[in-house]
Amino acid sequence: MGESSGLTDYRFLLVGMLGMFLLAIGLVFFFLAYQKRLLKQQRLHQQKEVEYQQQLLRANLLSQEKERNRIGKDLHDEVGAMLTTSKLYFRHLEQDAPKEKFAELKDKVFTLLEGTIASVRRVSHDLRPVVLETLGLKEAVANIRDELNTSGEIQMTFESDWKGVMNKEYQLNWYRIIQELVNNTLKHADADLIEIEMSGNGDHMKLSYTDNGVGMASGRHEPGLGLSNIESRLSLMNGGLVFNETKHGVSFELTSKKTMNTHEHG
Amino acid sequence: MFIIVPFLLGISRWQNLTLGQKAMFYVVFLAVLVDGLTMTLKELGIQNNLWVYHLSVPVHWVLLIKVFTKEFIKPIPRRVLNVLIFGFTFFSLINSTFFQPLNELNTSAIVFSSIITLTLAVSYFYGLIKQPRFKKLESQPMIWFNTGLILYNSGSLLLFVFANFVNDQSPDFIITVWGLNIVFVVLLQLFYAVSLWVSPQD
């Protein structure tokens, strides 16, 4: 009887030791497998992050090139052409020419030079929005609204209860984002109403943008470059972009987290 | 005898060992000392060499805590370290003085240290799962060291819990279960050897 009990204890202890050992092996394998899976996920995440950054960089470069081309075209087609014409007029502008012809040529040159100045001002304004520089973001957006409403082709409403401080870099980023959104609506949306709301404080800024056009599903928007630029600018401001589902048109909510690392008021 | 493998590896690679690996080497070095001392005592005809374990178990514990201190992702707070080191040493002293005298194997201290070592080893793996930081697990010494600790302490824990019972059984019984313990020890030494062999890469 005693021998049988000893044998049972013996088996119990051996099975116990081996069982614990096997459990430990199971635990180690679980850890290793889980860790490998985590590392794989981490690698994929990093890869996606790199691809996204590359996409933003590419969009940024393309956008710069596009802007340079536009400026080059404006200078060549408008300013260059007007200056060339002015030069031709100057060639015919002689002191001993008949008084009437001299006055006519002088008026033409004067008109051309005024046109040239206006073109240069427009190009310069596109590069550095003066209203933004002098009056800040709210006034600059209000200026876009006024220009659009004056055109009569589309109506824009703009409301802002944003209170805070924003540096010039952030202001310019937001201004360009709004310009991009408005341009997209004008080019592709067939909309007759744009609504913009700005809210937030020094810690964050939120911008709601909606139009009543054909929407993203129509495929007429330009999701590649334009939206990548917007995302690129938002990522520079630790922000993001969210699409809201709407029956008609598009609706975006854009946010930036930090707006106060600055000394200038918006 | 297997302890000589990680010991020689540690000696030959001493210049290339990281601080963590050096802390691991001290654990191996203690095991060599204990093995050497117990064998010498046996050769000298001194039958009871169990007092060596009463000394080595607290020292081994302190050295293990040093390894974990160097390798844990979140540093162990100083207060917890003090509780672990001084608390265990105090417990070991009380155990040797009042409960398991020097001519008995100090199984209570060994079991207690095994349980806390297992807790620390599992916590280390849990910490890595929560916050992975190594790209190549196989080249991380602590992964090998920790795995060795988990396997050995899991396998041998029950033996030390029932050690007094085991020693009253038949010689076959004793040889089998202590033989199994030797297998676990050999395995532990192999893992120690690998932990001293690899060069850590992130």
Image (cartoon, rainbow, N blue to C red):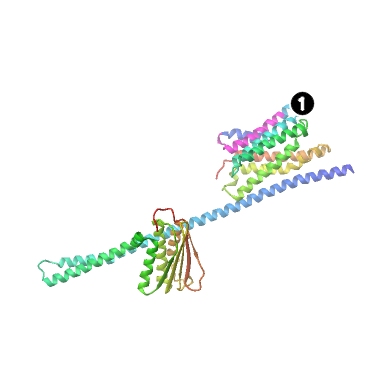
Q: Residue furthest left?
A: A96
Q: Is residue A197 left or right of residue A32?
A: left
Above/below status of B128 relative to A193 = above
The image shows residue A37 at horizontal and vertical percentages of: 60, 53
The image shows residue A11 at horizontal and vertical percentages of: 81, 45
Q: Residue at x 62, y 37 (%)?
A: B66
Q: Residue at x 62, y 35 (%)?
A: B25
Res B1 seen here: no
The image shows residue B110 at horizontal and vertical percentages of: 73, 38
The stretch of residues the image draws in magenta is B15-37
Res B107 seen here: yes
Above/below status of A77 relative to B92 = below
The image shows residue A73 at horizontal and vertical percentages of: 31, 65
To which residue does mark 1 refer?
B46
Name the image quarter holding the C terminus of chain A.
bottom left
Q: Residue at x 19, y 70 (%)?
A: A108
When asked about the image quadrant of residue A66, the answer is bottom left
Above/below status of B170 relative to A68 = above
Looking at numbered disc 1 in the image, what kind of residue is underneath it? Ile
Q: Is residue A238 left or right of residue B112?
A: left
Above/below status of A158 relative to A202 = below
